[in-house]
Structure formats: C-alpha cells, structure tokens
Image (cartoon, rainbow, N blue to C red):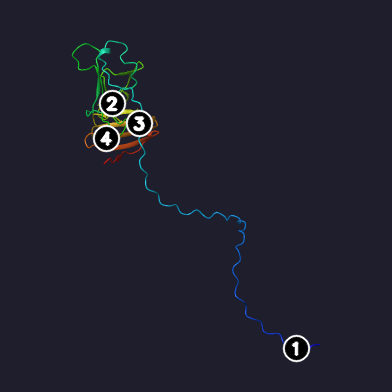
Amino acid sequence: MTDATYWLLLAKAGSEGKPGDTGPQGPKGDKGDPGPAGSTGPIGPQGQQGEKGDTGADGVAGKDGVGASVDLTPYAKKTEVIPSNLVSLEINAGATFDTPFIDFHTKTGVNDYDARIIVAGGKSGAVGQANMNIVANGGVIINGKKVATVDQINPWNSITDKGHDLNTVITDGRYWCKATMGNAPVATWGYLYVNSADPARVQQDFVSDTTAEKYIRMKFGDSWTAWRQVTLW
C-alpha cells in the first residue's frame, strides 16, 4: 500500500458545501387542456332603463277615404239619391257649429220641416257621446211598427177620488195622486210608483207633491210593511 492510498483511507468526509446559484428558468411548457366549464352563476339585478331612442320616420300615408260632402238637391226627385261611390257621410265635420240637423219635407208648402233629426251634446275626444233627437210628432216607425215613447210605455195614471186606498194599487205604473189617499204615508198629493213582480210581491214609492219627501214600502202576501222615509240628499 502506498502512502497516497493510506492517507486517502484515513481522510474524514468534509462538510457539505453551500448551494450553488439558481440556474436560469427553463423554457415554458406546453399549455394544458382546458378544464370543464363551471356552473352558470345567478342572474344579476336588472340594470337601469336606457334613454328613449329617437322617433322613427313617419310611415307611408294611407289612401284618402271616399266620404265627401254631397249636395243632394239634384237628386231630390229621383229614387237613387246617393251616388254609388259614396260609402260614408260626414256631416259638419271640422266645423265649429255643434248642432247639425237634417230636415225632411213630405209636402209642398211653407213648413220649415215635416220631420227633423238633430244631433247635439258631443264631447271632444270621446266617440259616440252625443244624443240624437228625432222630431216627428207623427211618431217613429221601424219595419212598419210604430216605436212607443217612454210616456206611452209607462203613462201617468191619475187618481182623483179622495180617500182612494193605496193598498189596492198594485199594478205596475206611475200614478198622479191628486187628492189625499187612504193608507198614504202623508196627507198630501203625490206621485206613486208601483213595481209589481206579482200580486203578492209589490213595491210602492210615494213622493209628496208638497215636501218632495220620498217614502217606500213593500207588500208580502196580504201584508204591507210600514212606510219608511228615504233620504235622497
């Protein structure tokens, strides 16, 4: 064994040396595959409304209507009085006068009219709110049948005998009580209104001609309730 070998066997291991400096960063690796999509989150609060956009351009104007003002004088003695191309008729359209009317003449003479249709009471911006008054004392006839007025349908009946028992007045109608009545609520003349479902179910309303006070009572079977005053104002 040589001296060099002997010393090599007897030498102790030295302490660990200090780490060397970090080497430069290696090249970036390849991008991995995308992971799975996460679940959709909750819907957020609605944002404020945006400003109103500009008004669009006007559309194409429609065709003019066929309605027109027509002088019917040339047709006065003809059967066909309306032109075939007239599909609508506007009376007083756009005028400031608010009571248009149509006069009808059936006889030669000086009468202003024999019958007249008057329209009045319309409201600006509200369609169909006017009233129509047909002035024809001879009556209005539809399909050959005369139309009854309210007064003809429900005329006033006069009761003039003093002490007449109102318990016996059980027929539908309006009664002008021109005397002090029996079983009346007050001892004055008055107006009696009777509504009768049948002879055993009758309602009577009585309005005093003197005080304008109103009273009401009912009949059930053969019995009448007491009169009760009704307040209207």
* Front: mark 1 or 4: 1
Q: Which mark is residue 132?
A: 2
Residue at position x 32%, y 28% in the image = 173
Quarter placement of the N terminus: bottom right
Tell me, yes or no, if residue 181 can be seen here. Answer: no
Residue at position x 25%, y 38% in the image = 213
> Residue lying furthest right in this view?
1
Q: How far apart are labels 2 and 1 at the CA level?
A: 141 Å
Would you identify the image quadrant in which residue 128 lies? top left
Q: How far apart are labels 2 and 4 at the CA level?
A: 31 Å
Give coordinates of residue 91: x percent, y percent: 27, 24
Quarter placement of the C terminus: top left
Chain-order first, disc 1 or disc 3: 1
Would you identify the image quadrant in which residue 8 lies? bottom right
User: Residue tagged by mark 3?
Assistant: 195
Residue 224 lies, with reference to residue 47, above or below; the image says above
Q: Do the residues labelled 1 and 3 touch (CB within 8 Å)?
A: no
Q: Are marks 2 and 4 in contact (CB under 8 Å)?
A: no
Residue type (three-letter) at the residue carrying disc 2:
Met
Q: Nearer the viewer, residue 101 or 6?
A: 6
- Callout 3 crowding tier (Cα within 10 Å): few <14, some 14–19, many ≥20: some
**Helix or strand or loop: what does disc 4 sit on?**
strand
Residue type (three-letter) at the residue carrying disc 3:
Asn
User: Residue tagged by mark 4?
Assistant: 207
